[in-house]
Image (cartoon, rainbow, N blue to C red):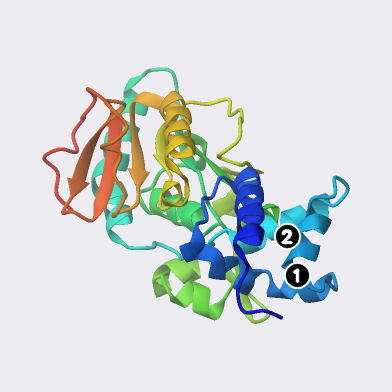
Amino acid sequence: MKDKLDSNELALWSQFLSELTGMSLNEDKEYLIRERFQGLLKKYQCANFSHLYFMARDPDRGDLREELIDQITTKETSFFRDTAPFEALHRVVFPELLKQCRASGQNRRLKIWSAACSTGQEAYSIAMILHEMGVSPDEYHITATDISRMAIEAAKIGSYNRFEVERGVPPASLERFFLPNSKNWRVKDFLKESLTFQQISLHRPFVLPDRFDLIVCRNVAIYFSPKPREELFGKIFRHLHPDGYLLIGSTETVSDLGNLFCEMRLESRAVFLQANGKRGGLVESKV
């Protein structure tokens, strides 16, 4: 098998994967296709990547397209990943948002959207913080979505190996929120009570019934080309409560999107956005 896709093959794959995922793959990312699809070449007994491409283009091969999506999308995640954003949620963001919800006089639940939840660690981390703050499950709801059906199914089960839990979950939280299950640890049912998992492709039209107080969309838009990226943040803006917050990755910025959002950084590590003109209490807060 040749070491590299030629320019025509790469152009076909790039266009196809953009249609499937919204990702923009240039020549620098050609190696991702070769490395991540090797197993599919063997599984489907394809002689080369062109064979795999035309097989995946078959309208009846939705199963293969799902596998391509699962393999090409980056699922790097962990419990309480990067620490600082979760500290900010615990100390500053959630107290403010909960105060707003409780002051509404309408028994309004805190609504959270984990927009690229992968195999669930981010959504469960958020739920653990709220439980540790003494927030009742009927006071909040977390909608967790991902483009990968396989990742969503794994998130629903909530079973993780020892490395995955020890990587980020403190021992006291492990005992409180997980049960040992053979060689793995499984999220206890009470932590799942206020979570809903759903497959959604962010680069395509989608419908969510809520406007959210907090939207977490970290390190997703970096894979999009400019126009799909702009469209994504436009959708997020429309789903964000007027006084809500958007959490993005520490290296991301939306300064090129006009005046949709205003940005605030907590010690340059946790980047929160609000709809322009809504700064709330985070500007002067430190974590």
Residue 287 seen by the camera: yes
Q: Which residue is mark 2?
A: 67
On the picture, is 148 further left or further right than 134? right
Position above or below: 145 against 170: above
Q: Position of residue 155 (x, y in %)?
A: 62, 57
Disc 1, SS: helix
Residue at 41%, 70% in the rendered image: 168
Residue 189 position in % (x across, y down): 62, 55
- Quadrant of the image occupied by residue 180: bottom right
Asked if the residues shown at circle 1 and circle 2 are in contact, with their CB atoms under 8 angstroms apart, the answer is yes
Image quadrant occupied by the N terminus: bottom right
Residue 40, label in figure: 1
At x 72%, y 74%, the residue is 39
Q: Amino acid at mark 2?
A: Glu
* Relative to 134, residue 105 above or below: above
Looking at the image, which residue is at 73% across and 54% down?
66
Residue farthest toward the front in the current orientation of the protein: 7
Please tell me whether mark 1 or mark 2 is closer to you in this view: 1
Q: Is residue 77 visible?
A: no
**Number of other residues with Cα within 10 Å of mark 2, as a class: few under 14, some 14 to 19, many 20 or more:** some
Q: Which of pointers 1 and 2 lies earlier in the amino acid sequence?
A: 1
Q: Is residue 1 above or below residue 259?
A: below
Secondary structure category for the residue under label 2: helix
Direction from residue 185 to residue 221 in the image, left or right: left
Where does residue 196 sit, x and y in percent of width and height? 61, 43
The amino acid on which the numbered mark 1 sits, given as a three-letter code, is: Leu
